[in-house]
Image (tube, helix red, strand yellow):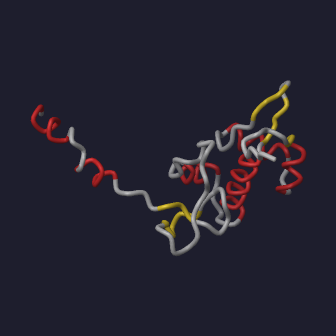
Amino acid sequence: MFRNDDQPMFNIGVIAELLKVHPETLRIWEKHGLVEPSRRNKQRLYSNNDVKRLQFIHFLINEKGLNIAGVLQIITMYPCWNIKNCNGGAEKGDKVNYNKPCWKEPGTYCYVIEDKADHCSACPHLKDCHENS
């Protein structure tokens, strides 16, 4: 059977119970843009990936001691935060950033992304840019 981790399935009560937080906490996190559950007939529905995002937020707040502003700052460093087809992180030993635990898969880390400056210096249009400036 095909499993879609972005399929909205769980209501706010189920997720609050799972995370051991009050439903109002989830509403506050949503209000601040930390997560965007789907809606059906005005009811919030969370996907498996939403649950993973919420678990990561919960970890940052309760284990790392961050406030909502700190969490917002951290998640802006995750370009994959809202990407639907993100595969998650990699195990130690791969080309990973050990300072950046993956939000999607606990115990894994985000991949090291090649430096954009290296990519740009190899760009065939770079020469044109310098000639026109």
Q: Can you tell which quarter of the image residue 124 is in? A: top left
What residue do we see at 74% from left, 37% from top? 37
Q: Can you tell which quarter of the image residue 114 is in? A: bottom left
Image check: 13 left or right of 39? Answer: right
x, y (%) of residue 4?
Answer: 74, 44
Residue extending farthest to the bottom is 93
What residue do we see at 68% from left, 58% from top? 61
Q: Nearer the viewer, residue 9 or 28?
A: 9
What residue do we see at 66% from left, 60% from top? 60
x, y (%) of residue 81?
Answer: 59, 47
What residue do we see at 82% from left, 43% from top? 24
Image check: 116 left or right of 110? Answer: left
Residue 109 versus residue 123 in the image, above or below: below
Quadrant position of the C terminus in the picture: top left
x, y (%) of residue 121?
Answer: 23, 50
Image check: 120 left or right of 110? Answer: left
Residue 124 versus residue 90 in the image, above or below: above
